[in-house]
Image (spheres, rainbow, N blue to C red):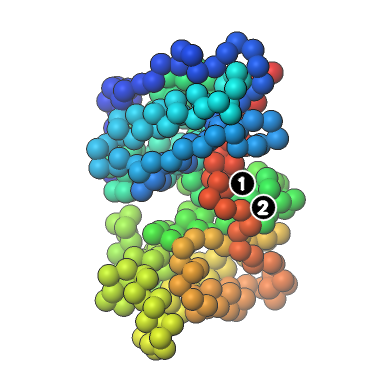
């Protein structure tokens, strides 16, 4: 967890005047925001969840919370003044963000060093003040699952688990068709489940033995002595036994962690996503084998599928929670 930023500190972020961005009449518009450690994306949605305009820029993470908020507002101003947005009025803002969002959907409860100073930022209040519309926040992988529930691989599911394997290991769970936030906002954080394969390895959160320490892209690259996962994937494709073993070890460890979640929740579907899945078949094959070996026989039939939506999934999931207005 990073150091906390007090509401008064975060409130010094430059804000965007709402004047001229919305008209009193016109169709309702909602703003979707996806804040990651490397990029921020913003889109304005119209009726039927149609994207009318979108914009993206690198996240100025190293400059602190105020700069990140200012970047969101700059992108918001850009998309809301696009001709495609017409004379619509902004009725709500939905944000999917890296870090853990407090259960009330208003503030960032904690964050890693990917977003220094992000913890404690009263993001919903800052966006509401600047854009004059109600805002709600949710974790980015939780927003991802919400998007897949709306229009993707989990559509129609009552219970679902999402796993995002990339720079970190993210996760989210849904019960009765609703993404669960949890008592502290951290429900579904699969990357921090302890597994035997990660014993003695330090997770980016600071603890020892979490699955992220052996199953994420950077973790596997480090274990293979490589600069990044692309080097490991290329070596595995060229027949390297060592590279393939690293990928299998990571996938099996994530399957172990996932088995406990599937055994506890009995979901209708498990949705997989993330850049690690593109490192060749060894990771996913090991994940599926380990999951099947460690759940009740009855649960081996739970479908494990790839995500169906593209890069707008977090935006769609976040905006699905935004107020639609009268």
Position of residue 159 in the picture relative to residue 33 (left or right)? right
Position above or below: 61 against 299? above
Q: Distance of mark 1 from mark 2, alpha carbons?
A: 7 Å
| Image side of residue 210 versus residue 284, left or right | left
Q: Secondary structure at mark 1?
A: helix
Relative image position of residue 269 (x, y in whole percent): 67, 60
Residue located at (71% from left, 59% from top): 268
Is 164 above or below relative to 115?
A: below
**Mark 1 — residue?**
147
Name the residue rendered at 34%, 42% in the picture: 59
Residue 60 in view:
yes
Left or right placement of residue 199 versus residue 154 in this view = left
Give the position of the C terminus as an image quadrant.
Answer: top right
Query: Which of the two residues, 184 or 307, is positioned nearer the viewer here?
Result: 307
- Residue 209 visible in the displayed image: no
Residue neighbourhood size for the residue with mark 2, other residues' Cα within 10 Å, grouped as few (<14), some (14–19), many (≥20): some
Q: Mark 1 vs mark 2: which is more N-terminal?
A: 1
User: Mark 2 — residue?
Assistant: 152
Of the pair 138 and 296, the residue shown nearer to us: 138
The disc at residue 220 is: none
Vertical order, 159 against 12 (above or below): below
User: In front here: 306 or 105?
Assistant: 306
Q: Position of residue 117 (x, y in %)?
A: 28, 38
Badges 1 and 2: C-beta atoms under 8 Å apart?
A: yes
Residue at image coords 32%, 49% = 114
Residue 142 place in picture, x, y as percent: 54, 47
Q: Residues within 10 Å of mark 1 (few under 14, many from 20)?
A: many
């Amino acid at each position: 967890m990073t150091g906390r930023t007090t509401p008064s500190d975060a409130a010094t972020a430059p804000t965007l005047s709402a004047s001229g961005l919305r008209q009193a009449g016109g169709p309702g518009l909602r703003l979707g925001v996806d804040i990651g450690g490397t990029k921020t994306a913003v889109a304005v949605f119209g009726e039927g969840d149609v994207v009318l305009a979108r914009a993206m820029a690198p996240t100025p993470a190293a400059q602190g919370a105020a700069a990140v908020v200012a970047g969101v507002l700059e992108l918001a101003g850009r998309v809301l003044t696009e001709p495609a947005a017409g004379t619509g009025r902004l009725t709500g803002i939905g944000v999917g963000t890296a870090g853990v969002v407090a259960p009330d959907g208003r503030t960032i409860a904690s964050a890693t060093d990917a977003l220094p100073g992000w913890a404690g930022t009263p993001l919903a209040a800052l966006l509401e003040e600047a854009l004059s519309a109600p805002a709600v926040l949710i974790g980015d992988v939780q927003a991802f699952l919400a998007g897949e529930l709306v229009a993707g691989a989990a559509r129609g599911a009552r219970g679902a688990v999402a796993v995002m394997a990339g720079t970190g290991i993210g996760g989210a769970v849904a019960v009765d068709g609703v993404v669960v936030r949890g008592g502290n906002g951290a429900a579904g954080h699969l990357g921090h489940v302890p597994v035997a394969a990660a014993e003695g390895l330090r997770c980016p959160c600071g603890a020892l033995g979490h699955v992220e320490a052996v199953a994420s892209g950077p973790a596997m690259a480090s274990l293979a002595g490589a600069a990044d996962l692309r080097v490991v994937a290329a070596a595995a494709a060229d027949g390297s036994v060592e590279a393939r073993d690293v990928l299998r070890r990571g996938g099996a460890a994530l399957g172990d962690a996932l088995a406990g979640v599937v055994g506890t929740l009995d979901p209708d579907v498990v949705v997989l996503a993330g850049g690690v899945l593109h490192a060749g078949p060894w990771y996913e094959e090991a994940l599926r084998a380990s999951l099947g070996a460690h759940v009740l026989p009855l649960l081996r039939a739970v479908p494990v599928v790839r995500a169906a939506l593209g890069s707008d999934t977090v935006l769609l999931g976040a905006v699905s929670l935004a107020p639609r207005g009268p």
